[in-house]
Amino acid sequence: MDILVILGHPNPHSFNHAIASVVRETAQDNGHRVIFHDLYAEQFDPLLPRTEIPEYGLVPEDIQRHCEELRSSDGIVIVHPNWWGQPPAILKGWVDRVVRPGIAYRFDEGDTGDGVPVGLLKAEAALVLNTSNTPDDREQSAFGDPLELLWKRCIFSLCGVHIFRRRMFNVIVTSTHAQRQSWLNDTRQLVTELFPREPHSNCRDT
């Protein structure tokens, strides 16, 4: 399987980077090919130009490459912190530019765009891993977990990816080394549950 891993955190020493590293390592150990993007390290441009908005708009070569990777992936993993109930702007920009009509979804003939889109993604499953400094009970009672709604309902289910798992690791700021190691073990288990070991396969990280 081809597993697309997208990381959105500016600090290379963050726990998000540790999570992404374990995701990549586990997927490779299970015999999968990993396509990895650290959006901040790559200086991904999150601004969506007007010319890219239409389905057949002018899309630069680097964005086309991201689109093809998304289209062809068998599994998707997103890693990012919870910032104000949202992904970092750079990751939101990746969604704006890459989760495009004709790539991730389409509308039926005659639909002017006000209907329910048809999902086009090949991916069998998606995993979203988040970090937060808000305890679970307060997140649910005060905010209703907006990231769950965003990734599960507003993005992946509409794009045809119906197996969805998400895990929030919190509270990061007060966590101990032992807690973080336990969370990384949970990450390994989640990745293996969604993307089990493939026999007799060669894998490369790209």
Image: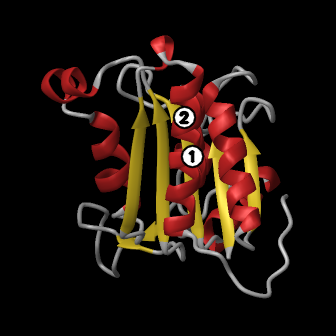
Can residue 59 be seen here? The reply is no
User: Seen in the image, is 144 located left or right of residue 51?
Assistant: left
Amino acid type for the residue under numbered disc 1: Asn
The residue shown at (44%, 21%) is 83
Instruction: Give the number of marks.
Output: 2
Mark 2 secondary-structure assignment:
strand
Q: Answer left or right for 162 relative to 7.
A: left
Q: Name the secondary structure under disc 1.
A: helix
- The residue at 60%/64% (across/down) is 56
Residue 185: give its label.
1
Residue in the foreground of this view, choosing between 132 and 178 = 178
Alpha carbon distance from label 2 to label 1: 18 Å
- The circle drawn on residue 80 is 2
Q: Position of residue 179 (x, y in %)?
A: 51, 28
Residue 57 is at least partly visible in this image? yes
- Is 85 drawn above or below residue 79 in the view shown? above
Q: Quadrant of residue 28?
A: bottom right
Residue 57 at x, y = what percent? 62, 57
